[in-house]
Image (cartoon, rainbow, N blue to C red):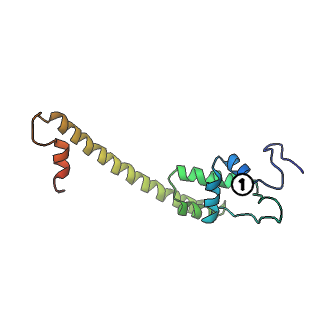
Amino acid sequence: MNTNRATGHSDTGLTIGQLARAAGVNVETIRYYQRIDLINEPVKPAQGYRRYPTTSVERIRFIKRAQELGFSLNEITDLLSLNDGDCSEARVIAEHKQEVIQQRIDDLSAMQRELTKLIKACKKNISGQDRCAIIATLAKARR
């Protein structure tokens, strides 16, 4: 059997365990990706284990990196369906994701400002008052 010196794996592919270790995920992650068609499940030979092509390592790393950047699995499926040369469509998907992330940042900043106000109100709260300023403010109807 020939062994690839760079990876230490046979040229015929990787077992699911080898793939998981090489891609930095667990076996269940690979099985899940197979169930949702992000990666293909190789045919199981009559004897032995399924063998995944070494290119599966790069694909799984792509999926994990895209998730770290906030892409959903559906968006990742869309990105994976693009050809390497289809940069304009990939850019549109990335620009949309950037807008969604910016909106989240804006929302979180607004939440942080409101919490800061509540904390300041709580610190100013005179001991012995009937209610905590934070609880009283949260209990009020929204404007």
Q: Is residue 134 left or right of residue 27?
A: left
Residue 2: in sight, yes or no? yes
Q: Position of residue 115 (x, y in %)?
A: 26, 43
Residue pointed to by mark 1: 16
Q: Position of residue 101 (x, y in %)?
A: 43, 52
Which residue sits at x=25%, y=45%?
Answer: 114
Check disc 1 and report its element: helix, strand or loop: helix
Q: Residues within 10 Å of mark 1 (few under 14, many from 20)?
A: some
Q: Position of residue 35 (x, y in %)?
A: 62, 65
Q: Position of residue 44 (x, y in %)?
A: 77, 64
Which residue sits at x=34%, y=51%?
Answer: 107
| Three-letter amino acid code at the position of disc 1 | Ile
Q: Is residue 26 left or right of residue 49?
A: left
Q: Nearer the viewer, residue 81 or 119?
A: 119
* Rendered position, 63 above or below 117: below
Rendering quarter of residue 87: bottom right
* Rendered position, 62 above or below 82: above
Which residue sits at x=69%, y=52%?
Answer: 58
Rendering quarter of residue 8: top right
Q: Is residue 73 left or right of residue 43?
A: left
| Extreme residue in the right direction | 1
